[in-house]
């Protein structure tokens, strides 16, 4: 099953990173899934649960985000969402010389380590700080 090999690879990468930084566990793994990657996110989450068993990631949650397919026309430079199934013809000039610029990725975007939530009562760290200009 394709999803199982993806899940095993994600678990493997995160576990190596966890060991490298001495993390004790993992809370969340965020993964971008391209619409055209051929991965079913529900199925992947299920496989991820199985792949985590007995690793540092046991009990962690996989949070997936779908990335729409995007193509760029070489002759005119236009980019558009390909949709699914993908429409690879340029909507402007109908050229078929197009390049897929997004939609096939399987990318770990964020890992929340269990160690980050250290002592009980410590203030939560905001992920981003917005500054007034
Ligand atoms: Zn075009």
Image (cartoon, rainbow, N blue to C red):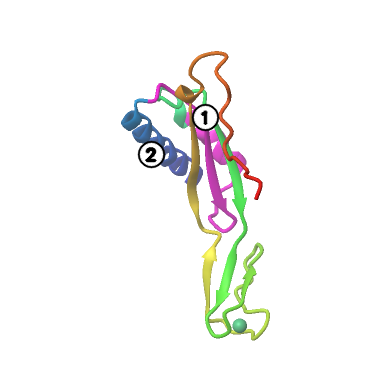
Which of pointers 2 and 1 indicates the residue nearer the eye?
A: 2
Q: Residue at x 51, y 58 (%)?
A: 104
Quarter where residue 13 is shown: top left
The percent position of residue 84, horizontal first and vertical second, equals 65, 62
Reading the chain from its start, which is encountered first: label 2 or label 1?
2
- The picture quadrant for ligand 1 comes to bottom right
Disc 1: CA contacts within 10 A as few (<14), some (14-19) or many (>=20): some
The percent position of residue 119, horizontal first and vertical second, equals 50, 14
What label does residue 13 carry, if any?
2
With respect to residue 97, does 38 lie above or below?
Answer: above
Q: Residue at x 57, y 37 (%)?
A: 127
Secondary structure under tag 1 reads helix
* Disc 2 from disc 1: Cα separation: 15 Å
Residue 55 belongs to magenta span: no
The percent position of residue 77, horizontal first and vertical second, equals 57, 79
Quarter where residue 55 is shown: top left
Magenta segment range? 23-50
With respect to residue 96, does 64 lie above or below?
Answer: above
8 or 72, nearer to the observer:
72
Secondary structure under tag 2 reads helix
Mark 2 residue CB less than 8 A from any atom of ligand 1: no
Disc 2: CA contacts within 10 A as few (<14), some (14-19) or many (>=20): few
Check disc 1 and report the residue beneath it.
49
15 left or right of 35? left
48 or 105, nearer to the observer:
105
124 or 12, nearer to the observer:
124
């Amino acid at each position: 099953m394709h999803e199982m090999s993806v899940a095993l690879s994600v678990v493997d990468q995160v576990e190596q990173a966890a060991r490298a930084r001495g993390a004790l566990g993992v809370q969340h793994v965020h993964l971008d899934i391209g619409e055209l990657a051929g991965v079913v996110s529900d199925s992947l989450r299920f496989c991820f649960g199985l792949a985590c068993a007995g690793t540092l990631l046991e009990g962690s949650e996989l949070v997936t985000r779908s990335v729409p397919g995007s193509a760029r026309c070489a002759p005119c430079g236009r980019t558009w969402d390909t949709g699914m199934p993908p429409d690879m013809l340029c909507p402007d000039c109908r050229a078929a010389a197009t390049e897929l610029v997004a939609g096939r990725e399987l990318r770990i975007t964020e890992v929340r380590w269990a160690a980050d939530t250290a002592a009980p009562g410590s203030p939560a760290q905001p992920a981003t700080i917005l500054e007034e200009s």
